[in-house]
Structures are given as C-alpha cells and as structure tokens.
Amino acid sequence: MQPFTKLTARAAAIKIQNVDTDQILPARFLRKPRSAGYGNFLFHDLPDDPAFAEARQVGGENGVSILVADRNFGCGSSREGAVYALVDAGIRCVIAPSFGDIFASNASKNGLLTVVLEHDDIERLWQSLEASNASEPTVDLEAQQISVPGGVTISFEIDGFRKHRLLNGLDDIGLTMAFEADIVAHEDRMAVGPDWISVRQ
C-alpha cells in the first residue's frame, strides 16, 4: 500500500455525528468487485441536506484528500469496503473526535490515516477551512502535526504500531514479508526435519 508521510491537500468538512459505514458505502454496492470502483459509490445515499454538501463532492476531480469529520465516524458494521471507498475516491486522511474501532483498524491496514482530535480542535479546523476558502492543510504523520494556512497548528497522538505501518506502507502481507528471511530459514530447516526429531534419536 502507499506509504503516508506528509500530505498537503484540499479538505472537506463533514459536520454530522455518527456517519456509519453504510452511509460511507451502501451495502448493495458490496456485490460489485472493487475493480468496479468503490470510490464511485462513496456517500452515494446521503440525503439532500446542506450538512452533507461537502461530503457529496468528495472524490473524482475534486482533489479532496482530507476529511474533517464529527464524532464516531465509521461506526456501524465492520465492512472494510467503507475504507476501500474512501481510499479509492482519493481520501488519505480522516480527522475526527472519535472513530468506530473496527473502521480505524481497517483504515490503518489500507493506508488511510485516522487522526483523533478533541472536538474543540475540530471546530478550530472547520473555522480555519471556512475562513481560508478551500485552503490546503498539511498533515505530517512523522511530526504528528496538522497545520492550516493562517497559523493553526495542532499536534495529535497515534499508536506507534499504526504509525510505523502507515509510514512504511505496510499492509498485513507487507508486515509478514518483513520477516521473509526468517520464514525462508525456518522452511529450510523444516525441509531436513525439525530439531526435536534428531534430539529424540
């Protein structure tokens, strides 16, 4: 998967709590293969409400790669397809006060950075984005900082293991293959018989 180090990109605000995985990717689209382009179905069924306006514009040629969302983003069912839809639409980072636990785990396995901030900091980001008229914030994973043109800089915490896998672009297979030399050495030893056999003899 693509490593995440530092991203400067357009951001969109989603000022709705409890956006669940069925809103991110409606269940009926899971019948399609990912090659059909899950990003095309992102937020497909969101109601015609001004609060969802920016969410409906995400993806395509819009250039939005960062979402600044409200509490409990990605709650609901454990479908990994919701993360696929965000990533396939070009979203690399979601910032929110809290996330569904399984969603956040799936995100880190697919190169999508989830940043948890206090709600007051989310409000500051929303205000900065509105004041700067489509400015491009920078998310620096290594420094663990978010900065917005105009002077707002906010630090964030992240689990060390998730940070490592995102910085190095390691999905589950990549993590396993980091031990390739040890795996090969073990298989070579097993090919001539495990040590305990010779000990018993």
Image (cartoon, helix red, strand yellow):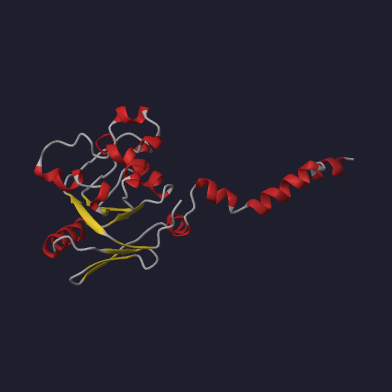
Picture coordinates of residue 78 (x, y %)? 36, 36
Q: Residue at x 57, y 48 (%)?
A: 176
User: What residue occupies the far left of the structure in this picture?
Assistant: 50
x and y percentages locating residue 125 in the rendered image: 19, 60
Point 37% across, 58% down: residue:
158
Image location (x, y in percent) of residue 186: 72, 47
Q: Which residue occupies the extreme bottom position in the image? A: 151
Which corner quadrant of the image does residue 19 belong to?
A: top left
Q: Residue at the spot x=14%, y=45% of the render?
A: 53
Left or right of 127 on screen, residue 172 = right
Nearer the observer, 85 or 20: 85
Q: Quadrant of residue 201?
A: top right
Q: What residue occupies the far right of the structure in this picture?
A: 201
Frontmost residue, 31 versus 124: 31
Q: Is residue 13 left or right of residue 39?
A: left
Total marks drawn? 0
Which picture quadrant has residue 200? top right
For the residue pair 98 and 4, the one nearer the viewer reads as 4
Q: Is residue 132 above or below residue 181?
A: below
Find the residue positioned furthest to the front.
61
Image spot of residue 139 (x, y percent): 31, 63
At x 40%, y 37%, the residue is: 35
